């Protein structure tokens, strides 16, 4: 897996310490982003898994689906998900990411945030199946949501990115060791959003 090619004008690289992050706001053109949002929303077999928090079981505050080239299981937050096959749209997106980043992603985890009450709590993508310094390619479709990052040790190192429709965020290097990320709830009345995080699971 090589580093993102930082040769386009249309990127944002905040040069954060202890990790690498590059944001491509216009990764997809508007028509393609609209088309993919509708298609994925209507055809992905979304599920809502139970999670255990401090011994109590809740339903995860979003819908998810896991898809893989080679059949894999993936475990996080005490959930083990069985993967389903990649669809044409997921392969299209993986190939589009290859124009920016030569990658060997074999799995994609999709999240559907139905409204502002759906969220994704503070975590790092640091499961051992992802390897030591995982590269994560994260595509956003639909409603813009704020992506928060905070350094695990330096509590004042925090920042936010508004993840827009059709954008791509790439996290790499030691990012998952040193930083946590989240999509918090919002009390604003908002539309739904789909996020796809492409990963390599070994
Ligand atoms: O929805 C997002 O942008 C973040 C998703 C995420 O953090 C994850 O699936 O691990």
Image (cartoon, helix red, strand yellow):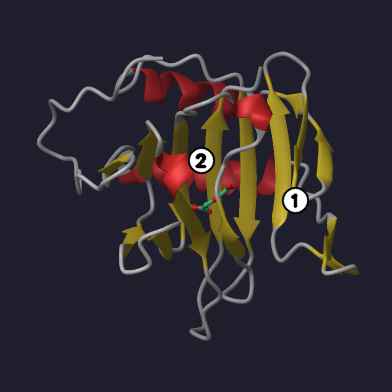
Q: Secondary structure at mark 2?
A: helix
N-terminal of the pair, mark 2 or mark 1, is 2
Residue 75, compared with residue 58, is above or below; it is: above
Left or right of 46: which side holds 86? left
Q: Farthest residue toward the bottom? A: 187
Residue 173 rendering spot, x and y as whole percentages: 37, 31
Q: Nearer the viewer, residue 195 or 128?
A: 128
Real-space Cα distance between discs 2 and 1?
Answer: 28 Å
Does the rendering let one see residue 139?
no
Tell me if mark 2 has few (under 14), some (14-19) or many (20+) residues whose alpha carbon lies within 10 angstroms of its own.
many
- According to the picture, the residue beneath numbered tag 1 turns out to be 77
Does the rendering let one see residue 142?
yes
Left or right of 66: which side holds 26? left
- According to the picture, the residue beneath numbered tag 2 turns out to be 36
Residue 62, compared with residue 94, is above or below; it is: below
Q: Secondary structure at mark 1?
A: loop
Residue 106, compared with residue 172, is above or below; it is: above
Residue 177 rendering spot, x and y as whole percentages: 48, 41
Among the 4 quarters of the image, the one containing residue 65: top right
Residue visible at 47% across and 34% down? 136
Residue visible at 50% across and 76% down? 190
Residue visible at 37% across and 37% down? 170
Q: Which mark is residue 92?
A: none
């Amino acid at each position: 897996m090589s580093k993102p090619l930082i040769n386009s004008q249309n990127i944002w690289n905040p040069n954060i310490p202890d990790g690498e992050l590059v944001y491509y706001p216009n990764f997809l053109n508007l028509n393609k982003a609209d088309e993919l949002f509708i298609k994925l929303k209507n055809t992905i077999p979304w599920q809502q898994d139970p999670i255990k928090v401090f011994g109590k079981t809740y339903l995860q505050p979003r819908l998810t689906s896991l898809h893989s080239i080679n059949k894999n299981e993936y475990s996080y937050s005490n959930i083990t998900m069985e993967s389903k096959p990649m669809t044409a749209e997921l392969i299209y997106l993986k190939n589009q990411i290859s124009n920016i980043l030569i990658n060997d992603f074999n799995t994609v985890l999709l999240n559907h945030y139905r409204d502002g009450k759906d969220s994704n709590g503070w975590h790092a993508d640091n499961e051992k199946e992802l390897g030591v310094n995982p590269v994560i390619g994260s595509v956003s479709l639909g409603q813009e949501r704020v992506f928060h990052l905070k350094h695990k040790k330096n509590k004042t190192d925090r920042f936010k990115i508004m993840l827009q429709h059709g954008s791509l965020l790439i996290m790499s290097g030691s990012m998952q060791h040193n930083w946590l990320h989240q999509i918090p709830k919002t009390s604003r009345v908002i539309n739904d959003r789909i996020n796809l995080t492409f990963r390599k699971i070994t």
